[in-house]
Image (spheres, rainbow, N blue to C red):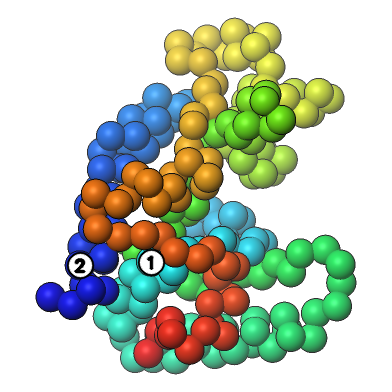
């Protein structure tokens, strides 16, 4: 077993623990506020998709199992996105549709990044000593947490929650990328997340390739 195989093995254990101990429970608890479903892919159409090195290496393992024609389609999309980014001059971040989105469905769903696995849940981050809740952007499309979201205050409304009659309150969890991509937690499993880049930027890196 080479070093990369060992690291991927540790990463897979981490994903399993993350799902079993945290995410499955959180999504179940918040199911009345979450309206994600297959084919609902707005979150995959406009983003930078921060990805760590180990996540990209795991994606590459899934990619080689796809049909050859689908691989070629994805590689063409990657080249097209990369070309647009090379010519991008605006000062705002460059966003794009994830190249692994095919017919509004992720073709590498089982290999998706952690940011994709947590998407849909509300989470909190430390902002100068204060916890700041991050609500999924799709709330503005009438989706996740929209049934308790006050558009005037841009906040979750306790009054709206009480009117829904839903037993479990809308909660924010400690699942920011800063928390979940912490190498201190992964050291016992024998891997590090490594550098984080926008997904498309990894395809300039000769050390991490899909083929």
Q: Does any portion of residue 118 appear in the rendered image?
A: yes
Question: In percent of the image, x 51 and y 15: which residue is there?
Answer: 169
Residue 95: horizontal and vertical position, in percent?
70, 67
Front residue (pair 51, 2): 2
* Distance in Å between CA atoms under marks 2 and 1: 11 Å
Q: Residue at x 26, y 65 (%)?
A: 7
**Where, by quadrant of the figure, is residue 129 drawn?**
top right
Relative vertical location of residue 38 with respect to residue 171 in this rendering, above or below: below
The quarter of the picture where residue 146 lies is top right
Residue pointed to by mark 2: 6
Considering the image in quadrants, where does the C terminus appear? bottom left
The residue depicted at 61 percent of the width and 56 percent of the height is 42
In the depicted structure, whether residue 93 falls above or below residue 168: below
190 or 153, nearer to the observer? 190
Earlier-in-chain disc, 2 versus 1: 2
Helix, strand or loop under label 2 = helix
Place of residue 183 in the rendered image (x, y in percent of width and height, measured from the top left)? 40, 51
Quarter of the image with the N terminus is bottom left
Pointer 1: what residue?
54
To which quarter of the image does residue 23 belong? top left
Which residue occupies the foreground of this view, 207 or 115?
A: 207
Q: Classify 34 as above or below 80.
A: above
Rendered view: 174 above or below 207: above
- Specify whether 139 is left or right of 164: right
Furthest-left residue in this view = 1
Task: Give how far across and how far down residue 113 sits, in percent.
Answer: 43, 59
User: Which label belongs to residue 184?
Assistant: none
Rendered residue at 50%/65% (across/down): 195
Horizontal and vertical percent position of residue 133: 64, 29
């Amino acid at each position: 077993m080479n070093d990369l195989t060992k690291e991927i093995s540790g990463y897979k254990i981490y994903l399993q623990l993350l799902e079993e101990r945290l995410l499955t429970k959180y999504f179940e608890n918040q199911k009345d506020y979450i309206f994600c479903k297959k084919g609902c892919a707005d979150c995959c159409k406009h983003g930078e998709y921060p990805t760590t090195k180990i996540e990209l290496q795991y994606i590459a393992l899934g990619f080689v199992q796809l049909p050859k024609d689908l691989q070629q389609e994805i590689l063409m999309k990657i080249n097209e996105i990369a070309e647009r980014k090379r010519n991008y001059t605006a000062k705002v971040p460059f966003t794009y549709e994830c190249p692994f989105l095919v017919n509004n469905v992720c073709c590498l769903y089982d290999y998706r990044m952690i940011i994709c696995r947590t998407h849909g849940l509300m989470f909190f981050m430390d902002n100068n000593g204060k916890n700041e809740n991050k609500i999924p952007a799709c709330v503005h499309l009438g989706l996740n947490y929209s049934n308790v979201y006050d558009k005037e205050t841009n906040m979750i409304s306790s009054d709206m929650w009480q009117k829904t009659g839903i037993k479990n309150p809308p909660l924010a969890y400690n699942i920011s990328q800063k928390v979940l991509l912490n190498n201190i937690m992964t050291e016992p499993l024998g891997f590090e997340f490594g550098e984080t880049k926008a997904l498309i930027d990894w395809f300039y890196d000769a050390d991490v390739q899909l083929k």
